[in-house]
Image (cartoon, rainbow, N blue to C red):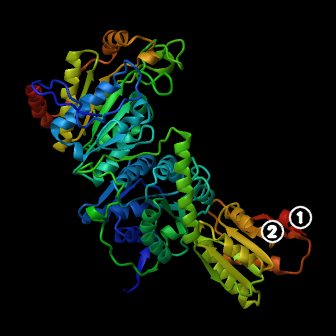
C-alpha cells in the first residue's frame, strides 16, 4: 500500500478503526481533539460501531469501562488534564481485569498548563495511573507511522493481557503530518469470538459478574497476585526499544517519543564530528527496557537522558543502570522542546575533557540534573 | 436449596427466577431487599432475564450483582449511568439498568445521571432514596431532610448552611430525554404494588427504545435512622413524603400507552 500523508491524531484514529475498535468515547481537549473528531466522522459509516462524545473524561472512561465489560473493543483518547480525571475509572478497569486502549497526547502541565507538546505524564502513565497496585502497558511512538503501528497492535495486547494499553504520544506527534502506510482492515469480533467473561446477557449459562470489589483481604490478595503474575508476563514478553549506533558508543543517549527522534538528529551531527554517540529509545515505557540498558551501561562511558520534562524517565534509567555509568539529564519543560543543537551542546560538554563542571552546568536554557553522581561516587 | 412440589396446593409465593437464592447483607427492616424482589419479578414477567445487565452502584447496594440472576457489573461511585451508557450503546439489544442510592446518584453522580438523561439513553434507573449514606454509616446525603440528624449533620441538617434536600425526580423530569420519571414508595402494600407497576413500565420504556426511565423509590434505613423497622416505614409516610411527594413527574406522550397497559394488567 502506498504511503499517504496523515496527521498524527487522525492516523491513530484510522489505525484504531482498522484494528476493529467498536466503541469510542471521548471528550474534546487540545491537542488530541482531531482524534475525537475523526471518530465522530468515521464511526457512523460502520454499522454496529459506536461513537459518543461524553460529558467529561470521567464519563468517557466509565463508558469505556461499560463497553469493555461486554467484551467490546473499546478506547478513549485525551490529553494530560483529561487523563488525570480518568484515573479513577482506569483503576477500576485494571481491578476488573478488562482490556481497553487509551491514547494520551501529552501537553504541558501541571494544572491547565498549555497545549504545547510535553512528556510530563511519564510518571502518571508508568507509575500512578490510578490507585492500587497495577500498571498499564505504555507504548511511546516517536513517529506517526509508529503511532499507527502501535495503536493497531494495542487492542490485541490489551485483550491478551486483559489490561489497559496506553499509547503515550505528545502534541507534536498528534499534530504533525507524516507519510504513513496504513495497516489492513481487521474484522470486528463476532459473538462467538467474545471472551468467556464478557457480559452479554445470561442466555443459557449462569449469570456473570464483573467487579473490582473484594471485601476479603485473602480474596483481594489473590486478585492482586493474579494481576502481578500477568504483569510479570508482560514484563517478560513486551519490552520494546530501538537502538542506534550503540556498538561503540562512548556516550549513550536515552530518550523516548518525540525526544527520541530529535536525539537521532543530534546523534548524526555528533557522529559527523567523530563523537561516538549512541541512542537507546525505549518504546515500551512500562515495561521499561531495563535489562538492555543495564547491558549498554556497562559498555559506555556516559549516559545522557533527554526528556521534555524535569527528569521522569530518568528515575527508571538510574534504576536500570545501577551505577554502572554516570548519568546526566537535560530537559525542558512547559512545552519547550530541546532542539538538536542544545543536545549537541550537552554531548560536547560531556565528551570534552573534564573541567570545572559546576560552571558548565549552567549552559543552555534547559534543566540539568546530575542524577547518578552520588551513586557513582559511592561506587568509586 | 431443595425445591419441593406439593401436589394439590396452589403456589401463591415463589422466588422469582431473576433473584438468586441467597441471603442478603442488608440490615433488618431495610427495604432494599424488597425493591430487589420487585425488580426481579418484573424481569421474570417481561422475560428479559437472559438479556439484562445490571450496573450496581457504590453504596449499600454495591453487592446487588450477587442477588440478581442476570449479568452484572459494579460502577465507580456515581458513574453507573456512564458505564450503563457504554454497555447499552455497544449492545443495544440488551436491557441495561442501574440501581443507585441517593449518595451515588444525587451527590457524586449528578453529572452522569443528568447527561445520560440529556442524551435520552435507553436505560432504566432505579433510584433508591433513603435520605442518608447507609453504607458509610449514616452521613448526610443530598436528600437528607431539613433538621435530620446524621453523623455528619449531628445538629440536624441546617438548610441555611448546606441547602435544602435535593429533589431528583423533579430535576430529572425537566430533561426531555428522560421520558418516564416517577417517585414511589415501599412503606405499605398499596405503595409496594404501585412501585412494582412503575418499575415494570420503566423497563418497558427501555424495551421500546423510548428513552431514559427513572423510578425513585423512597426506602428505609432503620439502622442509620435509629428506628425500628415499623417506625421507619411510618417515617417515610410522615416525614419523607411531604418533602418528596409521590407521583408521576414526567410521562412523555409516547410512554402514556405503557402506563395504561401496566395499570390494566395489575
Residue A158's disc is none
Q: Which chain carries label 1?
A: A
Q: Which of A193 and A317 is in front in this view?
A: A193
Q: Is disc 1 in contact with disc 2, using a CB cutoff of under 8 Å?
A: yes
* For residue A200, side relative to residue A147 (left or right): left
* x and y percentages locating residue A183 in the rendered image: 38, 78
Quote the CA–CA distance across marks 1 and 2.
Answer: 9 Å
Looking at the rendered structure, the secondary structure element under dot 2 is loop
Is residue B248 visible from the viewing direction of this image?
Answer: no
Up-down: is B47 above or below B13? below
At a point 24% along the width and 44% down the height, the residue shown is: B122
Location of the C terminus of chain B (image quadrant)? top left
Q: Which of A145 and A177 is in front in this view?
A: A145
* For residue A36, side relative to residue B162 (left or right): left
At a point 91% along the width and 70% down the height, the residue shown is: A380
At a point 46% along the width and 18% down the height, the residue shown is: B224
Q: Name the residue under label 2.
A: A323
Is residue B58 visible from the viewing direction of this image?
Answer: yes
> Tag 2 or tag 1, which sits nearer the N-term?
2
Residue A378's disc is 1
Amino acid at each position: 500500500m502506498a504511503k499517504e500523508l496523515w496527521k498524527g491524531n487522525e492516523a491513530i484514529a484510522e489505525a484504531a478503526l482498522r484494528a476493529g475498535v467498536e466503541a469510542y468515547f471521548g471528550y474534546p481537549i487540545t491537542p488530541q481533539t482531531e482524534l475525537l473528531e475523526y471518530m465522530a466522522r468515521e464511526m457512523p459509516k460502520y454499522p454496529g460501531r459506536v461513537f459518543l462524545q461524553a460529558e467529561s473524561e470521567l464519563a468517557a472512561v466509565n463508558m469505556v469501562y461499560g463497553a469493555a465489560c461486554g467484551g467490546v473493543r473499546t478506547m478513549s483518547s485525551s490529553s494530560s488534564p483529561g487523563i488525570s480525571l480518568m484515573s479513577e475509572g482506569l483503576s477500576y478497569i485494571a481491578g476488573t481485569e478488562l482490556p481497553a486502549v487509551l491514547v494520551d497526547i501529552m501537553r504541558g502541565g501541571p494544572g491547565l498548563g498549555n497545549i504545547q507538546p510535553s512528556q510530563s505524564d511519564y510518571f502518571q502513565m508508568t507509575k500512578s495511573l490510578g490507585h492500587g497496585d497495577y500498571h498499564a502497558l505504555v507504548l511511546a511512538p516517536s513517529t506517526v507511522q509508529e503511532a499507527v503501528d502501535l495503536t493497531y497492535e494495542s487492542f490485541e495486547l490489551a485483550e491478551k493481557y486483559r489490561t489497559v494499553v496506553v499509547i503515550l504520544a505528545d502534541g507534536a506527534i498528534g499534530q504533525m503530518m507524516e507519510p504513513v502506510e496504513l495497516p489492513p482492515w481487521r474484522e470486528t469480533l463476532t459473538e462467538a469470538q467474545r471472551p468467556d467473561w464478557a457480559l452479554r446477557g445470561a442466555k443459557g449459562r449462569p449469570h456473570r459478574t464483573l467487579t473490582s470489589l473484594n471485601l476479603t483481604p485473602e480474596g483481594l490478595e489473590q486478585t492482586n497476585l493474579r494481576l502481578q503474575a500477568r504483569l510479570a508476563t508482560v514484563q517478560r514478553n513486551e519490552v520494546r526499544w530501538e537502538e542506534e549506533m550503540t556498538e561503540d558508543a562512548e556516550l549513550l543517549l536515552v530518550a523516548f517519543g518525540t525526544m527520541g527522534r530529535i536525539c537521532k538528529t543530534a546523534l548524526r551531527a555528533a557522529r559527523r564530528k567523530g563523537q561516538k554517540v549512541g541512542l537507546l529509545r525505549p518504546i515500551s515505557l512500562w515495561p521499561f527496557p531495563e535489562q538492555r540498558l543495564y547491558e549498554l551501561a556497562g559498555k559506555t562511558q556516559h549516559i545522557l537522558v533527554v526528556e521534555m520534562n524535569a527528569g521522569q524517565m530518568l528515575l527508571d534509567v538510574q534504576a536500570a543502570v545501577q551505577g554502572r555509568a554516570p548519568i546526566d539529564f537535560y530537559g525542558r519543560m512547559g512545552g519547550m522542546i530541546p532542539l538538536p543543537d542544545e543536545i549537541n551542546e550537552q554531548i560536547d560538554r560531556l565528551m570534552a575533557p573534564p573541567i570545572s563542571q559546576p560552571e558548565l552546568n549552567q549552559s543552555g536554557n534547559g534543566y540539568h540534573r546530575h542524577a547518578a553522581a552520588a551513586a557513582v561516587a559511592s561506587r568509586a | 436449596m431443595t425445591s419441593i412440589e406439593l401436589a394439590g396446593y396452589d403456589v401463591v409465593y415463589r422466588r422469582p427466577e431473576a433473584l438468586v437464592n441467597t441471603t442478603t447483607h442488608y440490615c433488618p427492616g431495610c427495604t432494599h431487599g424488597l425493591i430487589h424482589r420487585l425488580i426481579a419479578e418484573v424481569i421474570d414477567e417481561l422475560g428479559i432475564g437472559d438479556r439484562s445487565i445490571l450496573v450496581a452502584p457504590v453504596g449499600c447496594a454495591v453487592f446487588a450483582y450477587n442477588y440478581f440472576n442476570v449479568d452484572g457489573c459494579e460502577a465507580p461511585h456515581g458513574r453507573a449511568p456512564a458505564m450503563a451508557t457504554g454497555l447499552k450503546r455497544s449492545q443495544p439489544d440488551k436491557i441495561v439498568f442501574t440501581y443507585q442510592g441517593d449518595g451515588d446518584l444525587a451527590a457524586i453522580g449528578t453529572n452522569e445521571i443528568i447527561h445520560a438523561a440529556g442524551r435520552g439513553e435507553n436505560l432504566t434507573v432505579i433510584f433508591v432514596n433513603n435520605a442518608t449514606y447507609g453504607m458509610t454509616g449514616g452521613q448526610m446525603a443530598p436528600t437528607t431532610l431539613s433538621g435530620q440528624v446524621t453523623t455528619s449533620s449531628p445538629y440536624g441538617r441546617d438548610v441555611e448552611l448546606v441547602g435544602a434536600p435535593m429533589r431528583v425526580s423533579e430535576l430529572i423530569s425537566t430533561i426531555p430525554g428522560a421520558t418516564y420519571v416517577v417517585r414511589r414508595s415501599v412503606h405499605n402494600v398499596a405503595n409496594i404494588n404501585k412501585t412494582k407497576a412503575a418499575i415494570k413500565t420503566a423497563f418497558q420504556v427501555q424495551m421500546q427504545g423510548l428513552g431514559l426511565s427513572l423510578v425513585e423509590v423512597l426506602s428505609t434505613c432503620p439502622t442509620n435512622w435509629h428506628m425500628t423497622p415499623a417506625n421507619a416505614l411510618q417515617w417515610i409516610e410522615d416525614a419523607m413524603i411531604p418533602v418528596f411527594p409521590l407521583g408521576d413527574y414526567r410521562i412523555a406522550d409516547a410512554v402514556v400507552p405503557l402506563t395504561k397497559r401496566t395499570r390494566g394488567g395489575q
